[in-house]
Image (spheres, rainbow, N blue to C red):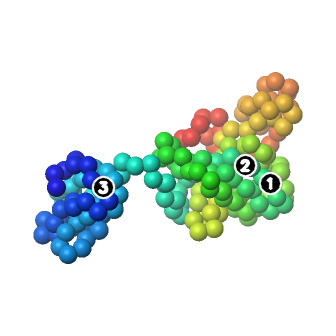
Amino acid sequence: MMEDSFVLPGDTVGSLEEFVPGDYTYAREGMIFATTAGLVKVDPKTRSASVIPKTNAPVKLNHGDIVVGEVIDLKDSLVIVSLAFKKGYEDRPISDEEATIHISNVKNSYVKDLRSLFSMRDILKAKIVDERQMRLSTGDEDLGVIKAYCNRCLTGLMRKEGKLICPNCGNNETRKMSSAYGLGVV
């Protein structure tokens, strides 16, 4: 198989005499086969043959990944988040995946009331701490709310001297803000 050739699952990528199987490939009976649709890539240093996926397959979420989502519900000890995408894969949305942030994973200090740190419709950045139960953490300084809306008039809140102020009605609110609040996903 030529490098940069487009392959489908099950297509031959190379032989085990020439290469070792790389990402998105598997070996059987002396040959290397593709596990996904994509382009064949050969690494001359490791002599590995891989496939670079070219499909809209769902993004795999792993422990330590940074994700962005919207707060859709608040309980006494949980924030429920509808995940939008994984950082680095902004063009491949996550569909129908919900995750939770337990009150113990919000900050590196005691949290008495989640409603003082999060609100419905907040957009936040969090780290996956348990990919099987989809538990998230916002404990790091760069994690937390990156966009918030006024609870009175639904206008986007502006960060001013460490506080969130509504430019429309003047309402002051608090959140567990990311150090990148208002800068988008960085």
In the rendered structure, which amino acid carries the disc numbered 3?
Leu
Q: Residues within 10 Å of mark 3 (few under 14, many from 20)?
A: some
Q: What residue is at 54 percent from the left and 46 percent from the top?
A: 93
- Measured as percent of width and height from the top left, residue 178 is found at 65, 45
Q: Nearer the viewer, mark 3 or mark 1?
A: 3
Mark 2: amino acid = Val
- In the image, is residue 150 above or below residue 61? above
Look at the image and tell me whether residue 2 can be seen: yes
The N terminus is located in which quarter? bottom left
Do callouts 2 and 1 mark residues in contact (Cβ within 8 Å)? yes
Q: Nearer the viewer, residue 142 or 24?
A: 24
From the viewer's side, name the closer residue of 96 and 59. 96
Q: Tag 3, which secondary structure?
A: loop
Residue drawn at x 68%, y 46% as measured from the top left: 70
Residue position marked by numbered label 1 in the rendering: 74
Residue 140 seen by the camera: no
Q: Label 1: how many residues lie within 10 Å, few (<14), some (14-19) or many (20+)?
A: some
Q: Where is the C terminus found, in terms of image quarters?
A: top right
Gap in angstroms between the C-alphas marked 3 and 2: 38 Å
Q: Which residue is mark 2?
A: 71
Judging by the rendered image, the residue that carries numbered circle 3 is: 8
Q: Nearer the viewer, residue 113 or 87?
A: 87
Q: Residue at x 65, y 63 (%)?
A: 135
Amino acid under label 1?
A: Leu
In the shown orientation, is residue 28 left or right of residue 35? left
